[in-house]
Amino acid sequence: MTCDHGRHKEEFFSVDPITTDTAVVTVGEYLDFRNASDFNVILKDQVRQGTRKFILDFSDTKSIDSTGLGSIFTLYRQLKPLSGMICFASASDTVRITLKLTRSYKVFQQFPTVEEAQKAVCTLG
């Protein structure tokens, strides 16, 4: 299956497990109406496999819209009853502005780097 621009959906995101219940998700250039449903499918599968903590790496993300943000909140609602969590790492300026405008920073903890997010998430146990 391909998405817009002929790219395979797997190319938009990469999921790298760092523990049995924690994964770093590297978000590609955008998380918006073009690929938000693929994002949901991929991460829902991760939840089924036991991942409960997600670190979203936005270092390369140039665009996020309400649909993309909605997909993150969908994941958040799935994780909440499972005592899961989502945090943001290496947010680009675009992502930081979107979080500020939507006040999403009140829901999702943010870290300047993926490494700092990993340290914090792994110490939460």
Image (cartoon, rainbow, N blue to C red):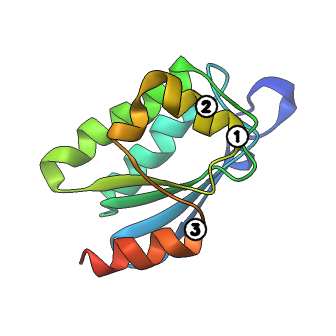
> Dot 3 lies on which element?
helix
Residue annotated with mark 1: 93
Mark nearer the viewer, 3 or 1: 1
x and y, in percent, of residue 14 in the image: 64, 57
Amino acid at circle 3: Val
Point 47% across, 38% down: residue: 41
x and y, in percent, of residue 78 in the image: 25, 41
Residue 58 lies left or right of residue 39; in this view the side is right
> Could you classify mark 2 by the number of other residues whose Cα lies within 10 Å: few (under 14), some (14-19), or many (20 or more)?
few
Residue annotated with mark 2: 97
Mark nearer the viewer, 2 or 3: 2
Amino acid at circle 1: Asp
x and y, in percent, of residue 82 in the image: 16, 53
Pointer 3 with pointer 1, Cβ within 8 A: no
Point 56% across, 75% down: residue: 115
Residue annotated with mark 3: 114
Pointer 2 with pointer 1, Cβ within 8 A: yes
- Quadrant location, the C terminus: bottom left
Q: How far is mark 3 from mark 1, CA to CA?
A: 16 Å
Amino acid at circle 2: Ile
Which residue extends farthest right?
5
Residue 67 lies left or right of residue 33; in this view the side is left
Q: How far is mark 2 from mark 3, CA to CA?
A: 19 Å
> Dot 1 lies on which element?
helix
What mark, if any, has residue 33 been given in the picture? none
